[in-house]
Structure formats: C-alpha cells, structure tokens
C-alpha cells in the first residue's frame, strides 16, 4: 500500500482524468468556454500544489495560489461557485484513489492532509472573493495549527 504522496504521484493521470470529466459534466460557463485542455491544465496545477503542500506540510503555496486565482477569476467574471467546483471535483477524484490505495490505519491521516490543503484553498478563495466583492479585507482562518499540529 502507498503513502498519500505516492498515490498523488502514481495516480496523477487517473485523478486528472476523473476530475476533468466531472468538471466538464458540471457545465460551468467559463470552464466550458476555456475548453477541456485549459481546464485540465488548471486542475493539474491545483493537484501539483496539493502534492507539494502535503509533502512539505506547508500551506503557503496553496494559499498564494488560491489568492491569485481568486483575483484572476473574479476579474474575469467567474462565479465563485465555478472555481469552488474545480476544487471539489479534484478532491473527490483524489479521495477515490487514496481510499483505494491506502492502508486503513493511514486513511484518516491521508484524507485529513488532502482535506486540509484543499479546504485551506477553498477558504482562501472564498475570503478573497468576498473581499473583492465588498472591497474590504475579510480575514481568513488560521489553519496552520491544524495542519502542522500536535504530535
């Protein structure tokens, strides 16, 4: 059985295939307009950040990416639901592969790591969108204690 980083690495293409299909089925206007190649590239970048953050136990790259994406997608007129959906379909695709390849004793930690990274991304994205929409700062949650937390 594999570690979560091994699953994310070894199952990369399968994860991306499943997430891209789910995203396409969601019929999200901006992703449909960009086309399947662009959508897959965006999912690949997000998956690479999940792997990096899980491997290094560092949420900063995900937070920076989510902040950047929020600004970029907000300015392009994306609805927050569209961008959140990309995070969601990727997480679901990851979970299917992780559950299939991870020993039961390691499953909670593996899913917790993935959930924390993507949850942080979604939280950052949402807070940034709200800040942009209201043109005022909305503080995000500090999840570092949960991620680097107590052993």
Image (cartoon, grey):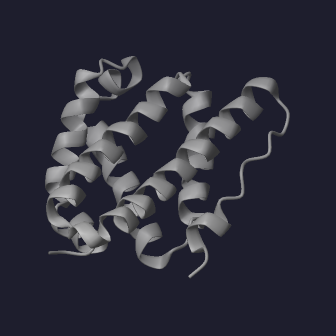
Residue 35: x and y in percent read 27, 29
137 vs 68, left or right, is right
Residue in the image at 47% along x and 34% along y:
84
Residue in the image at 35% along x and 56% along y:
47
Residue 46, above or below 11: above
Residue 88: x and y in percent read 39, 38
Badge count: 0
138 vs 109, left or right, is right
Q: In which quadrant of the rendered view does residue 100 lie?
A: bottom left
Residue found farthest to the right: 136
Q: Quadrant of the N terminus?
A: bottom left
Residue 130, above or below 121: above
Residue found farthest to the bottom: 151
Q: Nearer the viewer, residue 9 or 30?
A: 9
Residue 81: x and y in percent read 49, 25
Q: In which quadrant of the rendered view does residue 64 lie?
A: bottom right
Residue in the image at 50% along x and 57% along y:
116
Q: Nearer the viewer, residue 106 or 45?
A: 106
Residue 42: x and y in percent read 36, 45
Residue in the image at 44% along x and 64% along y:
113
Q: Quadrant of the C terminus?
A: bottom right
Q: In which quadrant of the rendered view does residue 130 lie?
A: top right
Q: Nearer the viewer, residue 41 or 79?
A: 79
């Amino acid at each position: 059985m594999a570690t979560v980083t091994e699953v994310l690495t070894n199952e990369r293409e399968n994860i991306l295939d499943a997430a891209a299909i789910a995203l396409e089925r969601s019929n999200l206007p901006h992703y449909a307009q960009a086309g399947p190649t662009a959508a897959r590239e965006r999912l690949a970048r997000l998956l690479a950040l999940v792997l990096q953050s899980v491997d290094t136990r560092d949420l900063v790259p995900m937070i920076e990416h989510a902040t950047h994406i929020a600004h970029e997608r907000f300015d392009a007129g994306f609805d927050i639901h569209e961008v959140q959906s990309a995070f969601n379909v990727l997480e679901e695709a990851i979970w299917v592969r992780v559950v299939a390849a991870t020993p039961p004793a390691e499953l909670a930690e593996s899913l917790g790591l993935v959930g924390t990274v993507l949850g942080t991304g979604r939280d950052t994205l949402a807070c940034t969108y709200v800040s942009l929409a209201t043109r005022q700062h909305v503080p995000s949650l500090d999840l570092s204690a949960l991620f680097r937390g107590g052993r």
